[in-house]
Image (tube, coloured by chain):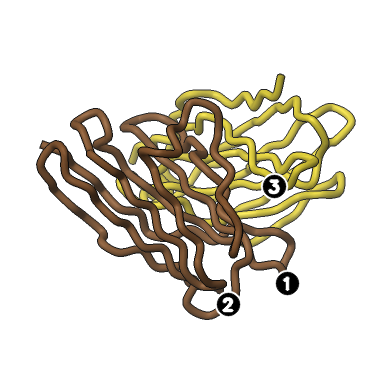
Chain colours: A yellow, B brown
Amino acid sequence: GQNIDQPTEMTATEGAIVQINCTYQTSGFNGLFWYQQHAGEAPTFLSYNVLDGLEEKGRFSSFLSRSKGYSYLLLKELQMKDSASYLCAVMDSNYQLIWGAGTKLIIKP
Amino acid sequence: GAVVSQHPSRVICKSGTSVKIECRSLDFQATTMFWYRQFPKQSLMLMATSNEGSKATYEQGVEKDKFLINHASLTLSTLTVTSAHPEDSSFYICSAIRRDGYNEQFFGPGTRLTVL
């Protein structure tokens, strides 16, 4: 079956760095997405990886290793507003998104 | 970025009534739209894939007669929850794919449905 795994919850300190991991097993691969979702709101797009390597976008970076079925989202210089759930999703061979359960990130002062 | 709107943003209804939720892509054409449901503290669950001009494809366990989806144009898809019950109370989110991008999904703001 298809499976996306990511930690349920993580805690980090304001100004620090946090890495949220995601491992996946899917039928086909057409890219991996990271979304941010604040409580009560719809998800917003953060990043897309389809080739191996690191994609950097401001304070956020995303890494992909297709051979390992592994990705991580790296958040630097954490701010209180970064407290949210971070969703990892893989687009399978049918171009449908398979979603992880999300990682709730708690930022402490 | 592309904009997807949903209406209404919040609805409260009595058990047994039907509720229609609209999803519009405002500045692009979306041949495919998705409908998701999210219960508190849970991940998004895909309900159905809606293709313009054809019948929606429902995920296993989603009743197509209860959740009616119509995708009549390239910018509008509707989800009708028929004979709603309290267990249908949830956050319903639509998304649309912009084909000229890299299959990125643009999400609507969501509709909070509460069935009394």
Relative to A20, B47 lies left or right: left
Residues packed near mark 3 inside 10 Å, few (<14), some (14 to 19) or many (20 plus): many
Tell me which corner region of the image, top left, top right, bottom left or bottom right, holds residue A105: top left
- Residue B78 lies, with reference to residue A35, above or below; the image says below
Q: At 80% from the left edge and 41% from the top edge, which residue is drawn?
A: A93
Marks 3/1 same chain: no
Q: Amino acid at mark 3?
A: Ser
The residue pinned by badge 3 equals A62
The residue pinned by badge 1 equals B100
Tell me the distance, in whole angstroms, between the alpha carbons under discs 2 and 1. 9 Å
Q: At 52% from the left edge and 39% from the top edge, which residue is drawn?
A: B46
Viewer-nearest of labels 3 and 2? 2
Tag 2 secondary structure: loop
Q: Residue A67 appears at what percent x and percent y? A: 89, 30
The residue pinned by badge 2 equals B28
Viewer-nearest of labels 3 and 1? 1
Tag 3 secondary structure: strand
